[in-house]
């Protein structure tokens, strides 16, 4: 009985990384469809469960229920798309919660500025 239980446990333990890796699938949307707030240009966009992002969230006292949500790090607003001056050489995103003074933005979806 112990051998069977341990083999099931081992199988589940080995399968977890594959399930976790498949859970976050960001999709690009046109910039014109960003209806959750301002467009942001973030230096990095990672899952909340990643080590650097989870550390930042902890330091800011932010608790998230879903650790698969994408979080933008070091973000600046993109005010007008297509008008000279404002461009993004990093990752343009549309985020749900941009209330952290550019340190992080929560609930991000990558956007395509060319559409």
Image (tube, grey):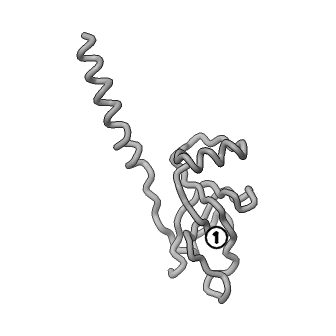
Q: Is residue 30 above or below residue 65?
A: below
Measured as percent of width and height from the top left, residue 94 is found at 60, 65
Quadrant position of residue 70: bottom right
The residue lying furthest to the top in this view is: 1
Is 23 in front, or is 16?
Answer: 16
Q: In this view, does 15 lie above or below 26?
A: above
As helix, strand or loop, the secondary structure at mark 1 comes to strand
> What is the number of callouts on the image?
1
Residue at image point 30% right, 27% down: 10
In-image side of 75 versus 52 (left or right): right
The residue lying furthest to the bottom in this view is: 84
Residue at image point 58% right, 67% down: 93
Residue at image point 75% right, 60% down: 101
Measured as percent of width and height from the top left, residue 73 is found at 62, 59
Quadrant position of residue 99: bottom right
Is 58 in front, or is 94?
Answer: 58
Is 33 in front, or is 21?
Answer: 21
Residue at image point 52% right, 47% down: 50
Measured as percent of width and height from the top left, residue 51 is found at 54, 46
**What residue is shown with label 1?**
39
In-image side of 7 versus 22 (left or right): left
Quadrant position of residue 13: top left
Measured as percent of width and height from the top left, residue 15 is found at 32, 37
Q: How crowded is mark 1: few (under 14 residues within 10 Å), some or many (20 or more)?
A: many
In-image side of 19 versus 64 (left or right): left
Q: Is residue 109 above or below residue 50?
A: below
For the N terminus, the image quarter is: top left
């Amino acid at each position: 009985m112990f051998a069977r239980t341990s083999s099931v446990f081992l199988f589940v333990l080995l399968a977890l990384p594959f399930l976790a890796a498949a859970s976050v699938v960001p999709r690009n949307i046109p910039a014109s469809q960003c209806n959750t707030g301002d467009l942001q240009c973030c230096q990095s966009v990672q899952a909340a469960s990643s080590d650097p992002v989870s550390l930042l969230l902890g330091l800011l006292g932010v608790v998230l229920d879903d650790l698969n949500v994408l979080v933008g790090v070091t973000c600046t607003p993109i005010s007008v798309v297509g008008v000279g001056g404002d461009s993004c050489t990093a990752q343009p995103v549309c985020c749900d919660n941009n209330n952290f003074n550019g340190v992080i933005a929560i609930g991000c979806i990558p956007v395509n500025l060319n559409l």
